[in-house]
Amino acid sequence: MEAVTSAVEKVKGFIDSLFHRRQNSYSRNPIEILKRLQRESLSEQMKQRDRLDKVERLLSFYKLSKGSPFQEASTHVRAEVDVLGAVLLMGDIDQQHADALDRAEVRTGIHTRFTFETTMRQNDTLVADFVACQEGGKNVGNISGRSLSLAKLSYVANVGDWFYAIAVPVGAQCRDFDIARNYSHKAKGLTTISSLDPPLLSQHNGGAIGFTVRKSNVVASLAQSVSGLGVQLGSDGIGHCLSTFGQVVCQLSRGVNLSLMGLHQVPKSLNHRVSLRPLTIPIGFLKQRKASENSVGASASSLGTNTQEIVSTGSIALKLETELDENAKVGGWFEMQNSNSNLRWAVTISDIFNEDLGWGVTFSGMHDGSKGWNQYQLESFLDLCLGKRFSLKLGTSYVADGDAQIPALMLRCIWSL
């Protein structure tokens, strides 16, 4: 019996030795080693992938809940250099001629503008304009320069296809609330009069906020602004001006637009010499206590001469534009100021749709009803587009202002970057 048990044990030991020897040789096989390493690495990769998915879900949730509006915002930078020069075809120049050129808005000089436009929340736009210019003053030969400075800061919020709001805390103009706010260099003439827009749109109004509503073929806009904080209104008063701008544009037919716009300005005075910080606007919810009779009498005597200066003013303008054919456009406008019964008007025929060569002719005038004074201006130009970024305008201008008659050759170069 013992012999049988020992024999069985020897056979079992022999089988175990063969199995371990085969297992060791199996583990030493390079192919099997690579397969085992591959299975282990794949398992680690799956674990790492699960961790990355969890981190990405957490970051996406954070962006949606507490993300900044500037995230993923793209900023576009545009630059424009505008050079306007004039050659006066006359030898004797006096102050009367210089004043006539200034009233005709012949703004010669070099103007540089850098525009930074950022799109936020997919539909909103934040725009900052930096301007530097070197232009002549009212006196002949008086050249003044200005370093690069912030000229405008605006934010346009598109609520929907029919409504958007505009906030301009710095450098607001009525032009910012115009229906067609995008003005290209093709629409610029040699002077402000030949730019197809009334001077009302070029007035500076400090800071403003407004909105625009669009319905079918009618678009309406309304804006409220405040300007002139700290402006001297008299010997004892420093004040500001509240302005309300409104516009209604109606598309009568294809290519025919009729615009009615108005501006109402109400100066506000402060009875003391105070200096307010920017964006500080007194609106008068609380009234100051009445001063003593002596101080009231003194202030009345000092402000008696300034009563006529602190009055509300306003302007109303009507503009009509129509397309003659595929290339030519004709437009006209007139503007009436109720403060001094001034009437300004202009009629323009232009071909500004051609990409290579354009032309324009403008006849404009100004009438002062209180003084019986008239001014007329005739302007014509050729527009040569040398590429998409450079425009050269050559033209003539004739200004008749009372006894002053000024013929001039005009040259304007606009280089867009």
Image: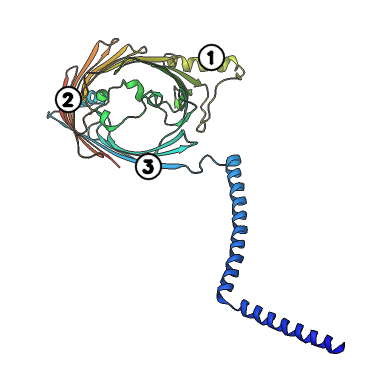
User: How far apart are the two marked residues, 2 and 3, measured between alpha carbons?
Assistant: 32 Å
Q: Quadrant of the C terminus?
A: top left
Q: Badge 1 is on which residue?
A: 297
| Image coords of residue 199 (percent x, y) | 32, 21
| Image coords of residue 23 (percent x, y) | 66, 78
Q: Is there a contact, CB below 8 Å, between mark 1 and mark 3?
A: no
Q: Which tag, 1 or 3, sits closer to the chain's start?
A: 3
Q: Residues within 10 Å of mark 1 (few under 14, many from 20)?
A: few
Q: Quadrant of the N terminus?
A: bottom right
Residue at x 57% of width, y 67% of height: 38
Side (left or right) of 11 relative to 159:
right
Rendered image: mark on residue 348: none
Q: Nearer the viewer, residue 140 or 301?
A: 140
Residue at x 41% of width, y 24% of height: 177
| Image coords of residue 376 (percent x, y) | 20, 17
Residue 371, quarter of picture: top left
Q: Which tag, 1 or 2, sits closer to the chain's start?
A: 1
Residue at x 60% of width, y 16% of height: 290
Q: Is there a contact, CB below 8 Å, between mark 2 and mark 3?
A: no
Q: Which tag, 2 or 3, sits closer to the chain's start?
A: 3
User: How far apart are the two marked residues, 1 and 2, measured between alpha carbons?
Assistant: 58 Å
Q: Please, what is the three-letter code of the amino acid marked with disc 1?
A: Gly
Q: Badge 3 is on which residue?
A: 77
Q: Please, what is the three-letter code of the amino acid marked with disc 3?
A: Val
Q: Badge 2 is on which residue?
A: 380
Q: Residues within 10 Å of mark 2 (few under 14, many from 20)?
A: many
Q: Please, what is the three-letter code of the amino acid marked with disc 2?
A: Ser
Q: Nearer the viewer, mark 2 or mark 3?
A: 3
